[in-house]
Image (spheres, rainbow, N blue to C red):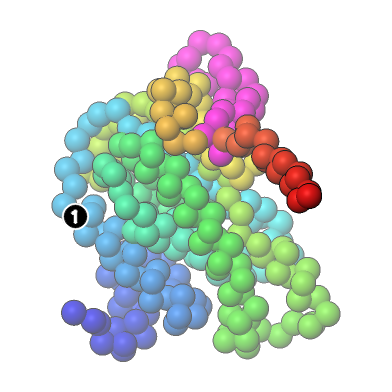
Amino acid sequence: MLKDPSFYDDVEALERYLNLPKGSLRNIPIYARVPAVDAIIKVKKMEETSLFRPGLYYIVLADLCANTAFNAKYGDAEGDVRTEWFQTAAIESIGEITVQNYVAFSKTIGDAALLIFSSFKDVYEWSEKFSANLEAMTGEYPENLEIRRVDYDESELDQRLEDFKLRARRLVHLGEVSYKEHLDPLSLAVSQTFKIEKSFSETELGCTQAVADAIRPKLGELGLTLRENKKVNIPGFGGEVMTYYVAKRKSSKAPRKSKPRKKRA
């Protein structure tokens, strides 16, 4: 059954229902708001029907790049829009993938998002969808400036759009997780993930050695490979361990050369 179009116009009610920061949806154009809201509602329903049991999980932390510099240059109000769109994209992306197992938890923390998955395949598909959604939202920013009647110099629009560009570092760690009051994740592994976040400077999906060891048998099947990042000290590990980036495997097949045709007699 299709929703009444006015359903998407009552942004304050939607934000309360979806437990999003006030203003998260207000500045998103309606054509982008509809799929975002539908996807986030799907995530909310998934969470309501999930059993949050203690166990071994993939812990994902995504962090918005260059947020402090953007806020300093354009002010807190513009910085809030950028952060709200980032958080919306993080949650929306869960609802837009076909989850193979289940997402145990999602949580927004300032300009970062914490998500906990039970399947690495879901982690990677979410990461790819997240990148696509961030790029799409960046493209909507000029229209958003007009909607909000923000005064700016047209000659500076390209630079403003480049500064606003939504990019996210993200990493995945593996560890035991327990929950406080059903939803709040508590564990050494979650703390470890936050401690090493700054060790990943690129926007590809990063991972720890624990994750690399767990996913190696599946890399070929998923068409992925691991690229070394750097060694880091993870509290509780008792020494440096390697970290990696997960990337798509490049095809090793060289293009076939066509044989020259024989001339007819």
Dominant secondary structure (helix, strand or loop) of the stretch shown in magenta = strand
Name the residue at 29% across, 83% down: 7
The picture places residue 143, in percent across and down from the top left corner, at 61, 82
Say above or below: 33 vs 237. below
Residue denoted by label 1: 48
Q: Quadrant of residue 82?
A: bottom right
Instruction: Tell me the residue at 25%/37% (across/down).
Output: 179
Residue at 55% over, 11% down: 239
Q: Residue at position x 78%, y 50% from top?
A: 265
Taking depth in this image into account, of 190 and 42 the one nearest to the observer is 42
Amino acid type at image mark 1: Glu
Residue at the limit of the structure toward the top, as seen here = 238
Percent x, y for residue 73? 74, 65
Range of magenta residues: 224-248
Would you say 144 lies left or right of 115 here? right
Q: Residue furthest right?
A: 155
